[in-house]
């Protein structure tokens, strides 16, 4: 049975909320609680593995379980990216280049193996594994890109969020006005929503002197978690009754 959600406007709202929460929660563990990037990455990758195994065992689409796995990839992606860029000293540009290469390799092997990069229907274990590892490294790449825009580009947190927001708007326009593959546009948007969430998370948590709103990692994480729980609850209610999707992506 298919275990993926419909790609609607609600999906993207939850995706941005989950990735922003992943940024603030990852920083909460690694920085606020001073666990460190390496240990935080090991902890959060373990959480990802546990949630992924639970998802793989599921026989149907479960909104709560699906978004828990998305959130685990987002938090793990935050600390993995920070470990590469800061602890290993690769820098945001080199880290992003490595992650782009890894993501392209995943897509290549996935397509050669399954003859598809479907984002609306996954029915085999192999395809589902490719799907989730593509999401994990998409979120890791998005963190690196967001940090690059916020720190190295000179745009700052707010400027980076505005730039990525504009890029996402372009992808939306292309989806509705061109025949460019919806699957390709989905993965472009999926990567872009991660740095949008990362920069938005920085806007929420960083102090005023650094261009942020100074809500802190704890306060921001609690607010975002509450919003995500409400949205997932609504998705679970919606999933129980047949309804026509709005703006649904198809595999073409």
Image (cartoon, rainbow, N blue to C red):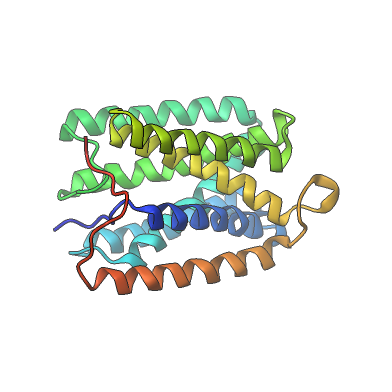
Q: Which percent across, then down, holds residue 6?
A: 28, 54
Task: Tell me, yes or no, if residue 84 can be seen here.
Answer: no
Q: Is residue 135 left or right of residue 181?
A: right
What residue do we see at 46% from left, 38% from top?
Answer: 191
Q: Is residue 27 left or right of residue 135?
A: right
Q: Quadrant of the C terminus?
A: top left
What residue do we see at 44% from left, 52% from top?
Answer: 73
The residue lying toward the viewer, choosing from 134 and 205, is 205
Q: Is residue 130 left or right of residue 47?
A: left
Residue positioned most to the right? 209
- Up the image or down, 183 lies above or below 48; here it is above
Q: Which percent across, then down, holds residue 42?
A: 51, 52
What residue do we see at 29% from left, 36% from top?
Answer: 183
Q: Which percent across, then down, holds residue 27?
A: 64, 54
- Up the image or down, 208 lies above or below 237; here it is above
- Up the image or down, 123 lies above or below 115; here it is below
Quadrant in the picture for residue 135:
top left
Q: Quadrant of the N terminus?
A: bottom left
Count of numbered circles in the view: 0
The residue lying toward the viewer, choosing from 179 and 111, is 179
Task: Tell me, yes or no, if residue 2 can be seen here.
Answer: yes
The residue lying toward the viewer, choosing from 94 and 185, is 185
What residue do we see at 63% from left, 45% from top?
Answer: 199
């Amino acid at each position: 049975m298919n275990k993926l959600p419909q790609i609607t406007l609600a999906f993207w709202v939850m995706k941005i909320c989950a990735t922003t929460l992943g940024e603030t929660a990852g920083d909460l563990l690694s920085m606020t609680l001073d666990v460190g990037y390496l240990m935080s990455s090991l902890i959060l990758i373990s959480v990802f593995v546990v949630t992924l195994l639970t998802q793989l065992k599921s026989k149907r689409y479960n909104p709560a379980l699906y978004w828990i796995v998305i959130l685990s990839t987002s938090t793990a992606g935050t600390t993995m990216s920070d470990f590469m860029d800061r602890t290993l000293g690769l820098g945001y540009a080199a880290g992003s280049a490595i992650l782009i290469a890894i993501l392209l390799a995943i897509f290549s092997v996935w397509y050669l193996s399954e003859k598809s990069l479907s984002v609306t229907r996954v029915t085999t274990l192999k395809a589902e594994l490719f799907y989730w590892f593509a999401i994990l490294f998409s979120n890791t790449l998005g963190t690196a890109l967001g940090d690059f825009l916020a720190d190295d580009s000179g745009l700052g947190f707010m400027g980076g969020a505005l730039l990525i927001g504009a890029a996402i708007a372009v992808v939306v326009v292309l989806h509705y006005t061109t025949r460019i593959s919806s699957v390709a546009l989905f993965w472009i948007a999926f990567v872009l929503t991660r740095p949008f969430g990362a920069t938005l998370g920085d806007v929420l948590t960083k102090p005023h002197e650094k261009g942020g709103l100074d809500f802190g990692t704890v306060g921001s994480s609690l607010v975002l978690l509450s919003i995500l729980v409400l949205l997932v609850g609504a998705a679970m209610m919606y999933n129980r009754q047949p309804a026509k999707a709005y703006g649904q992506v198809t595999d073409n």
